[in-house]
Amino acid sequence: MTRWYTVVCALGLIAGCDNADSPLPLVGTLERDRIEVSAEAREILIEIHVREGDQVEAGQLLASQDPERLQARVGQARAAEARAAQRLAELQRGPRAEEIDSARARLEGAEATLLADEKTLRRTRELFEQELLSESDLDQVRARRDQSRADRDDTAALLRERLTGTTIEELEQARASLEEAGAALADQTLALERLGLRAPVAGLVDTIPYKQGDRPPAGATVMVLLTGKGAYARVYVPEPLRARVRVGMDAQIRADGLPRQFAGRVRTVSSEAAFTPYFSLTERDRSRLAYVAEIDLLGEDAAGLPAGLPVEVSFPDLETAP
């Protein structure tokens, strides 16, 4: 609302000026750069370490959120990484001699069982041909022989796998699984660390919307910092003066409620007008355009000025120009 009111006043001054080339005092407000510190997760604020108005340094701990949930997730991710590492080590080592001996013994037993079932099937077939046994008896013996043959083949394949060892593809899959588990652990660890909300830059604590015990949504602004060396003036330059107001130009700033003026220097001037009423502008319309300019206040005594104060800005170079 304050900024819109400032713009309206600026346009009113421009519109009411009979001589558009005269350098009117430009109106605006004092501003400070704002940094919003957001909640990383929807967790309770268990402690707020600063108060409004405190000066903080970059990296200083501002507030802490409840870490229990993410600590559990970090433990889960660490266990998954350990399991993946053990699996990779197992594949790299290859089968043990005991496993090979066990597979070979199982194969010998399976072959002996198959041989016995083959003999039983032959005797049963002879008895069936002599009509001493039924066809169902023959089918049962044949099915038992087929199962023994399948067991023998399966055990033989297991022995071949033990003798061949781990394939390259299995090793690559195991390495990829370990890298995936490591990345998941790093992600959860970083999320846990960020539950301690820290100042990204040095600044002044402006507002703290939440209090200890609140549970802000993820991404909600928990704290607002005012950064930079101090306040700067944001004013609106009328179109007739735009070409003469340049970056680096000296300025004089007067703030409401303060008896003295402050020296300043133009740091930016917008290249686009804040308001463009029509696509095709007449000469009268062009004089109503305004361009945003930001002017740094110089001197240590200007560093503590609060944001939001209305200001008037003049340019000595423009006043002395012919």
Image (cartoon, rainbow, N blue to C red):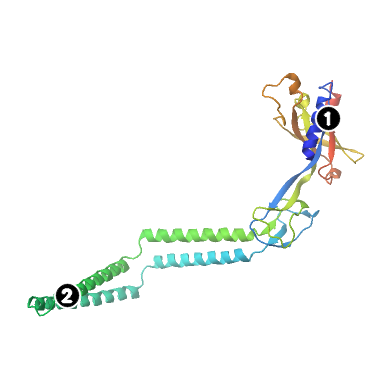
The C terminus: image quadrant? top right
Seen at 78% across and 25% down, the residue is 241
Q: Farthest residue in the bottom direction?
A: 132
* Callout 2 crowding tier (Cα within 10 Å): few <14, some 14–19, many ≥20: few
Q: Is residue 69 visible?
A: yes
Please give left or right for residue 103 compared with residue 139 in the image.
right
Question: Is 196 drawn above or below residue 270 in the view shown?
Answer: below
Q: Position of residue 251 (x, y in %)?
A: 83, 33
Q: Nearer the viewer, residue 146 or 92?
A: 146
Which residue is more in the foreground, 262 or 122? 122
Left or right relative to 108: residue 91? right
Q: Residue at x 76, y 48 (%)?
A: 226
| Residue 128 badge | none
Q: Position of residue 51 (x, y in %)?
A: 79, 57
Tell us which disc is closer to us: 1 or 2: 2
Compare residues 294 and 9 and report the one nearer the observer.
9
The answer, for residue 200, to whether it is visible in the render is no
Identify the amino acid type marked 1: Phe
Q: Quadrant of residue 98?
A: bottom left
User: Tags 1 and 2 in contact by the CB under 8 Å rule?
Assistant: no
- Image quarter for residue 228? top right
Residue identified by numbered label 2? 136
96 shown above or below 179: below
Q: Amino acid at mark 2?
A: Ser
Q: CA distance from mark 1 to mark 2?
A: 113 Å
Q: Identify the residue under disc 1.
A: 315
Query: Helix, strand, or loop for circle 2?
Result: helix
In the rendered image, the residue lying farthest to the right is: 259
